Each structure stands twice: as C-alpha cells, then as structure tokens.
Amino acid sequence: MKIKFNINNKLEDIEIKPAETLLNALRTNGFTEVKCGCNEGECGACIVLIDEKPVNSCQVLAMSVISKKILTVKGVGTLHNPHMLQKIFTSSGADQCGFCSPGMVLSAYSLLKDNPNPTDKEIVESLDGNLCRCTGYVKIIDAVRRTALIMNENITIRE
Amino acid sequence: MFNENLKWFFPSTISLAVRLIGQPGVILHGGGTRILKTQSRSIIGLVDVGKLKLNYIKYKNNLAHIGAAATFSDVVKYSKDNNCLLMLGAALSQAASTPLRNRITIGGSLKDFPQWSNLIAPLISLDAKIEINNGKTKIMSVEDYISEGTIKTKHLIKEIIVPEDESLFWRVKRFALLKFEYPIFNIALSLKMDNNIIKDARFVITGVKSRYKRFIKAENVIKGKILSEGLIKQCMKYIDPKFVSDYKYSDSYKTKAAIITIEDLLTELAVEKQ
C-alpha cells in the first residue's frame, strides 16, 4: 500500500508492507542514504530522526510512524549545501569508509540541537548507539566538539 | 517472520484498545523493539498506543505518574529535575543505547520483562504502583503485578506511579562485562532513613532463575539499625541469589559477582550516609 510520510520536510508517497521496518521502507523507496548495518539496533548505521530524536530505523515498524517527521542525513544538508557538521566531519577526517557517517551525523545533529554546548562526556553518550570500525572515534568526537565551537561563535568556514 | 496479513489498529481510547487486544493474536505496540526481535507469526494484529496520549510524565501529590508510552529517554530527561525519579532515571540511562532508549517504552518493557530488564529492579525497590486496564481499572504494586501473574494476562498498562521519598538512599547497578552486552543482572537497593536509622529497605535483583528476587531476610536484618560494616556483613549472609548457567557465564560466577556487587553497593551507601 502507498502511504504519505513526512520525510525531510516533504510529503512523500511511500510503498510499504504492514510488517515492514522503517529502514526497509525507506531504502526500497529510494532513501538509500539510510544504511543497513546489523539490522538489530546495535550499530546505528540506520539511524534517522523521528520527531527530532535519533532512532534505529531497523527497530521501527514503518506503520507506527506515519504521522511523525522523519529526517534522514539528506535532510540535514545536501552535497552542494552541506550542514556545518557535515563540512567538519569531512574536513577533520571523521569519516573514512563513510558507512557509519549518516548515523553519526544525525546523532550529533540531534545532540547539538538539544544542547549547543555539550561536554565531551555528553558527546560520547549521545554517540553510544553508533559504531565505527575505521576512525577509533577520536576524530568523530573532535568533529562534534569543533562544530559546537564554530556554531556557537558564528565562525564561517572557507571552502 | 511476521504474519503476511498483519493488521494495524490505531485506537484513540483505552477502552477500544482493551477491546481490540481481547481478540486472539492481537497485541499492543508501543515502541516495537521487542516485537521486532520476536516477529512471531502468531501475531495477526498490532494495536498502536500512539493515539492514546500515554507518553506523559507528571508530578502530583508527591507522586510521579509515568504514562506507559513514555520512553526510557523521557524518564531519564525528566529525572534530572525530579528527586523521585532519580533512581529510575539512573537505572534507565544505563539501558541499551540512546537511539533505542528513544524508542523503548515503559509499558512495553514492563509487560515484556526481559531477563536483562533495567526497569523492574528499581521499580520494585521504589515500591512503585501500576495502573492497568483489562476492562476494569486496577492499581497494584509492580511486585504483585509480577508475582501474582497479572503480567501474563491480557491488559493495557496505563501508567506507573512512583512515590517521592526524600529520606531514600539508593544504588542501582547494571552488571555487564561490556557496555554492549545485555546485563547479566540488575540490582536496585533502597534504604529509607530516619536520621541514621534504617526505617525500611528493599533489595532487588533481576536476571536470576526466578526472574526477580527480593532479599527480604536481609532487609529485615538491617531495619531499625544504623548501617555499618558489621551490619552489612550480617546482612550479606542472607543475600542468596540463584542463577542459571548460560553459554557465557556459570551460575557460580554470576552468584559471586552479584554478592560482591551488593556488598560494594551497601558499603557505598554506608559511606554516603556518614
């Protein structure tokens, strides 16, 4: 069946099955920026924001979020108009293979919206549902810290 | 795999939701994390609780009322400003991960009561009450809800009620060797104090053979006394959790770990009280 979902602030017609996860529904309808990792709610590759909160889309039945606002990483910023967080993730080497990056960016985006000046402990806690097998996390935490600093001081980054 | 003909219901009243779950194969859907783990083919209908507006946390007459659809994250956030939910907030902040805590509901976690539950031990230790509806409204203690078997019947959980007690000293511990592992057991200890005298105590462990255990003999030993090293030693004689071995840990390992953990937590409480 086709159902309208609010994805990245647009109403989208999504073809879903009653028992389908949000992850599957999004990917089969073209939102492939949402990655499928473990499919068990452990790795965070599939994180999307539902009503501004990060959730594992593999652990959500699509039918249960029909009336909610869904944000994928493409709703945070685009290739030609990236969000500050996305710019700093790339410039500081916080993404390597890039598979965990959509989930990482969304978790960090949600944190900074809620808490623009997080401590290192709060950054680590907010990323506790995101696994990365490349970076060792240090550069990711640095990137979130730098983004907070730059956004709080209204600094512009030159391309 | 789920049944292909799975049906969804979105009732806006509790009475309709209760009527719907009265049908065979129809169950409640809160956050859905547990349903997705089991994906039982016997489920033919899901009753979503989203429109019942049970995602509240409010504070009235020294009682915190937590709606069944409130998530673990909601409780953790609210607990930072409310004394009566500090213990529960501390326990739930250790559960799973941020994105899962944003999805796991209080009602769903209580009804399912998984072996690794971070919720049940603090609720029993806090002497929390539960309001359920199975056609009639009923309020009972969480402990009775589990021990008397109501948990296994068809009903809807409306809310959990947690009393505030400023004389409460507490500790919670989620025991897992790695953060990512399901905990081997969860412990919640609470002491109601009158100056230095222990008025009441509730020591609870989950993850044991009987799912949960209260150490009532140990609680009785320390009531009316001052918490001291000697008293803790005396009390520890009655801490006797029974575990089942699994593919990772033997029952004797779990028992030793639980006893040492409880002794450490009681010692911390004694130091805090001084």
Image (spheres, coloured by chain):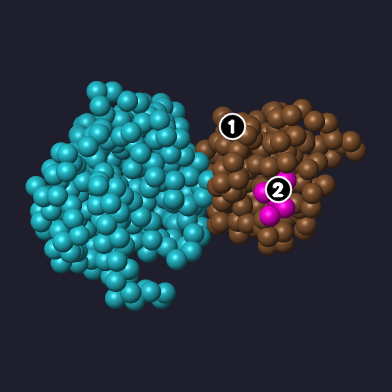
User: What amino acid type is highlighted by mark number 1?
Assistant: Asp
Instruction: Answer whether labels 2 and 1 touch (C-beta < 8 Å).
Output: no
Q: Earlier in the sequence, mark 2 or mark 1?
A: 1
Q: Nearer the viewer, residue B209 or B169?
A: B169
- Residue B103 is situated, as x and y percent measured from the top left of the image, at 49, 42
- Residue A139 part of the magenta-drawn span: yes
> Which numbered disc, 2 or 1, marks the residue closer to the eye?
2
Q: Colour of chain B?
A: cyan
Residue at (49% x, 59% y) in the render: B179
Q: Chain A colour?
A: brown
Does the segment drawn in magenta span residue A123? no
Q: In the orientation shown, which residue stands out farthest toward the top?
A: B61
> In the image shown, does B117 or B171 lie closer to the viewer?
B171
**Image quadrant containing the C terminus of chain A:** top right
Instruction: Name which residue lies at 37% across and 51% down.
Output: B118
Residue beneath label 1, please? Answer: A114
Determine the secondary structure under disc 2.
helix
Q: Position of residue A78 (x, y in %)?
A: 81, 37
Position above or below: B32 against A67: below
Camera-side residue of A62 and B173 = B173
Q: Which residue is mark 2?
A: A142
Could you say where residue B95 lies in the image, as x and y percent from the top left?
Answer: 44, 51
Q: Chain of mark 2?
A: A
Q: Is residue B160 above or below residue B118?
A: above
Left or right of A106 in this view: B137: left
Q: Residue A57 placed where, x, y %?
A: 59, 46
Q: Residue at x 76, y 53 (%)?
A: A95
Q: Is most of the magenta stretch helix, strand or loop? A: helix
Same subunit, tags 2 and 1:
yes
Magenta stretch in the rendered image: A138-143
